[in-house]
Amino acid sequence: MELKKKHATDLHHEYLEWIEKFKFYEEEMVRMRTHLSELMANNTATEVQSKGEQLLNRLDIQRNHLQTIKDHLRHQEQIIAHEVKANPTQYKHVLTPEDEVKQAEIGYFEKSFPELREEVREFQSKYL
């Protein structure tokens, strides 16, 4: 399997874009968590509590997954910054291996998050 490589400047811009996108996702998760908690506080039926807890747990899992990805991206950014300090003239010319595992994790997150958001919306519309 051939390792894909990109210029460090391209990776730097990608990482910054992802981190910016992730801020939106984090805000969305906080909003969904707040609305779910309010709904559960107002409706103590067993079915609502059970499904609400399940959705809250899934939100926590997504939040933890997102945090792991963000930590990795920040670490990669530090590596790029260190390389720039060590070789400032080569910064624009050096090809850096692309992290395909993290690319796949980001792709999975971006696919699964809208599905979870829709499930939360359906739950809220059912019990509001």
Image (spheres, rainbow, N blue to C red):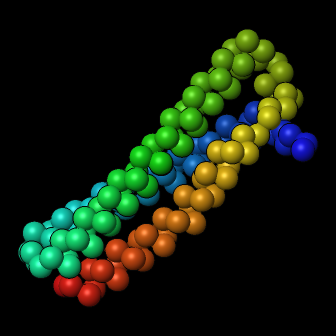
Q: Would residue 83 be found to the left or right of residue 28 on screen? A: right
* Quarter of the image where one finds residue 75: top right
Residue 21 position, x and y percent, is 52, 54
Query: Which residue is found at the position 40% from the left and 53% from the top?
Result: 61
Residue 72 seen by the camera = yes
Q: Name the image quarter holding the N terminus.
A: top right
Residue 25 position, x and y percent, is 44, 57
Query: Which residue is found at the position 52% from the left and 65% from the top?
Result: 112
Q: Name the image quarter holding the C terminus.
A: bottom left
Residue 40 position, x and y percent, is 15, 71
Name the foreground residue: 35 vs 126. 126
Name the foreground residue: 116 vs 87. 116
Residue 121 position, x and y percent, is 34, 78
Name the foreground residue: 109 vs 5. 109
78 shown above or below 36: above
Q: Would residue 1 be found to the left or right of residue 71 on screen? A: right
* Quarter of the image where one finds residue 101: top right
Name the foreground residue: 40 vs 71. 40
Q: Would residue 66 be found to the left or right of residue 125 on screen? A: right
67 shown above or below 115: above
Query: Which residue is found at the position 43% from the left and 70% from the top?
Result: 116
Residue found at the very far right of the displayed protein = 2
Query: Which residue is found at the position 91% from the left and 42% from the top?
Result: 2
